[in-house]
Image (spheres, grey):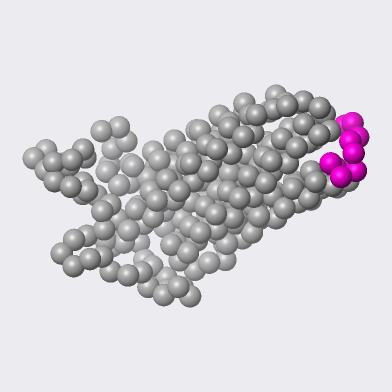
Amino acid sequence: MIETALAIGLAALSLALALNLWRLFKGPGVADRILALDTMVINVIGLIVLAGIASGSGTTFEAALLLAMVGFVGTVAYAKFLLRGDIVE
Amino acid sequence: MSAGAPWAEALVSALIVLGGSFALIGSWALVRLPSLMERLHGPTKASTLGLGALLVASVAYFQLIEGKWTTHELLVSVFLFVTAPISANLIAKVHLHRLRLGEASEAVGPAGTQPPPAPGVEWATHQAPHEGSAGDLQGD
């Protein structure tokens, strides 16, 4: 039962990533592209969590945690750069 | 993959399908909705909730089926639930800033046009909140 659910979840997250990629290329604004990248990071964290369940090992969560932190810092850096023209003031 | 109690497998499967569905709905909103302020709703609410369900599914799987207690996932979910509103706020500020500079255009969606700021002030995207506070660039 879990195998079927994992297949459904992986398919849904992959489709979600494809939709994010479409928004990333389509735009139309810079803010849309930042939002698309932020959502892609969230979906990739979901994929890593599902891969951790599928493999049954608890070694993937450091990757998920690191990606959560780096994704947030990246989004803030993009936004700060566009707002102030500088990242660290 | 070892087998657990049927109700545990059903719980984990339901949480995985729920999480995947919510993540997909959030990303579909990103494609479907017409303006950026409406598009922000999908990823910040639906996708974050979906990822929360996936992380709870992971905790439940390792505890109920593998018999291991892990808390890394809770750390990830707490971090995401704290940071999602902050990044959404910053993206909205970037959008308002570029609208004011005329570098972005706003499509009118079902929610209508955004309300104007209070008379005499601008949206606080570039200026400091108060005179003399941190980030106040007067006199630079």
User: Which one is in front, B2 or A50?
Assistant: B2
Q: Which residue lies most toward the left here?
A: B139
**B109 on left or right of B140:** right
Query: Which residue sits at x=51%, y=33%?
Result: A69
Q: Quadrant of the N terminus of chain B?
A: top right
User: Which one is in front, A5 or B56?
Assistant: B56
Asked whether residue A12 is in view, the answer is no
Q: Quadrant of the C terminus of chain B?
A: top left
Residue B8 included in the magenta stretch of the image: yes
Query: Which residue sits at x=58%, y=44%?
Result: A42
Residue A65 included in the magenta stretch of the image: no
User: Which one is in front, B18 or A52?
Assistant: B18
Question: Relative to B1, is B39 above or below?
Answer: below
Query: Which residue sits at x=32%, y=36%?
Result: A87
Question: Relative to B115, is B134 above or below?
Answer: above
Q: What span is colored magenta in the figure?
A: B1-9
**B4 on left or right of A23:** right
Q: Position of residue A37 (x, y in %)?
A: 52, 46
Q: Position of residue B40 (x, y in %)?
A: 48, 57
**B52 on left or right of B135:** right
Question: Relative to B28, is A6 above or below?
Answer: above
Q: Position of residue A67 (x, y in %)?
A: 56, 33
Query: Which residue sits at x=62%, y=26%?
Result: A62
Asked whether residue A4 is in view, the answer is yes
